[in-house]
Amino acid sequence: MPRRKKSRLRARLEPALLNAGLRLLTATLGRLSWSAAQRVGRGLGALGWRLSRRDRRRTLDHLALAFPEMPESDRRRLGRDCFRHHGTTLGECLHLFHRDCAFVKSVAEVRGWEEIEKARAAGRALLLFTGHCGNWELLGAAVNCRGLGMAVVARPLDEPVQQRMLTGLRERFGTPSIARGSEGAARQLLATLRRGDALGMLIDQDTKIDGVWVPFFGHPAFTPVGAAKIALRQNTAVIPAFIERLADGRHTVTLHPPLDLPDDPTAATALMTAKIEEQIRRRPEQWVWMHRRWRRQPDGTVLR
């Protein structure tokens, strides 16, 4: 068979097989307990560490950039823990397809809810920002199960079936998705804020949208600036929100006091990014080190 036909066939088969596997896992994990689903996911993450040479290499390269003083053996241990964490997160999310808000409240404690109440009492719109720390999908479920009414702004996944699964999971817990950069997204953003609901935004990835260069672990990183621009234009209360998994398998969501943003969007983005870095340093194994966070550099070079 010619190579071109093989690659086309592979391009069709791989998503189909992955989607079938996700459906099977979703059905299976829904029958298990929370802790059992976590153990299955952790095992998948450990397998991913062994099999995914590219992502393993990127993880170790990025850890070396962020923690040059850390011994290589410790970075390898941290990399393995990172893969296990994300496998666990997958197991948790697939398990949640079979659960409700009462269950979410039993596994995720929300701290700092008074910050939401104070901002609303002052008549301010709300923008919660976070990074890909902990189980960020569970974060959205936890705050909306408390009645926040938050819509998340995110880039749609490339694979339509997986995107439908993801939006379905969010909507199960009252979290609508606004497709970043799509036609009508700006109107949806403004309508959400004017209703008194909240926006949730993740701003810790190098993506093909309007961005600025800010420091991240001592290196320039191209960072989305949209959250800062919206916050400054709409005078929103900008609340750092983070979730982390505890040793017993439960989670803690922490809502911090609103930031006093500088008027310059770049400086505001740098401050928000610094808060994300603080959380990553707190629980480094619970961030996406395989993401090419520093792939572009200000001088035009592209890192692998």
Image: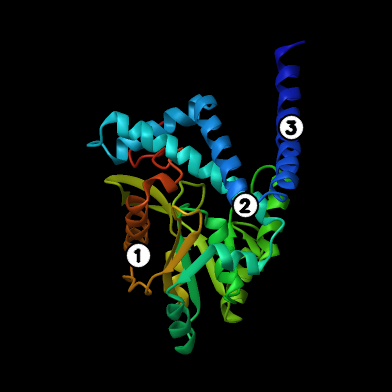
Answer whether residue 100 is visible to the viewer in this image.
yes
Q: Amino acid at mark 1?
A: Ala
Side of 39 relative to 239 (left or right): right
Foreground mark, 1 or 3? 3
- First in sequence, mark 3 or 2: give its number: 3
Which residue: 57% across, 47% down? 38
The relative height of residue 196 versus residue 211 in the rendered view (above or below) is: below
To which residue does mark 2 refer?
93
Q: Are marks 3 and 2 in contact (CB under 8 Å)?
A: no
Q: Quadrant of the C terminus?
A: top left
**Residue 160 visible within the image:** no
Amino acid type, label 2: Cys
Q: Residue at x 75, y 40 (%)?
A: 24
What residue is drawn where x is 37% and y is 34%? 77
Q: Amino acid at mark 3?
A: Leu
Ranked by sequence position, the earlier of labels 1 and 3 is 3
Looking at the rendered structure, the number of numbered marks drawn on it comes to 3
In the image, residue 54 lies at what x, y percent? 49, 27
The residue under label 1 is 268
At which x and y percent is residue 258? 38, 74
